[in-house]
């Protein structure tokens, strides 16, 4: 499990999951008129972190140590 979490596929999967979560928030905001601002902000920040880790290759540095 630890090897999977350090791999780039894991960070890509998490980023895609967070994009789906943002689509869920937009759906609820449009259809049900419920805007979850706190949930959106936390999801966007985690998405930014995951994309940064995936783009910079931080997961590869941890594998070599």
Image: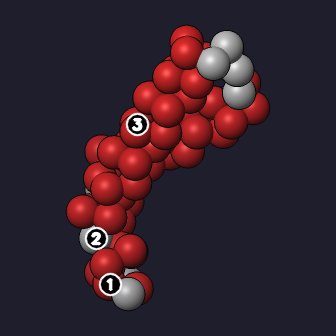
Secondary structure under tag 1 reads helix
Q: Which mark is residue 3?
A: 1
Residue farthest to the left, as pictured: 9
Q: How many marks?
A: 3
Q: Quadrant of residue 65?
A: bottom left
Residue farthest to the right, as pictured: 38
Q: Which residue is mark 3?
A: 19
Residue 39 percent coordinates (x, y)? 68, 36
Considering only vertical position in the picture, is 2 above or below 13? below
Q: CA distance from mark 1 to mark 3?
A: 24 Å
User: How dense is the environment of label 2, judged by Cα within 10 Å: few (below 14), some, or many (20 and up)?
Assistant: some
Whether residues under marks 3 and 2 lie with C-beta atoms below 8 angstroms apart, the answer is: no
User: Viewer-proximal residue, 51 or 57?
Assistant: 51
Secondary structure under tag 3 reads helix
Q: CA distance from mark 1 to mark 2?
A: 6 Å
Which residue sits at x=40%, y=85%?
2
Considering only vertical position in the picture, is 63 above or below 47? below
Chain-order first, disc 1 or disc 3: 1
Residue 34 percent coordinates (x, y)? 70, 20
Residue 56 seen from this side: no
Q: Quadrant of residue 51?
A: top left
Which residue sits at x=32%, y=84%?
3
């Amino acid at each position: 499990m630890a090897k999977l979490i350090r791999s780039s596929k894991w960070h890509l999967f998490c980023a895609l999951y967070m994009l789906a979560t943002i689509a869920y928030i937009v759906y609820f905001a449009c259809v049900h008129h419920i805007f979850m601002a706190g949930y959106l902000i936390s999801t966007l920040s985690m998405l930014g972190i995951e994309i940064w880790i995936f783009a910079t290759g931080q997961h590869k540095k941890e594998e070599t140590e």
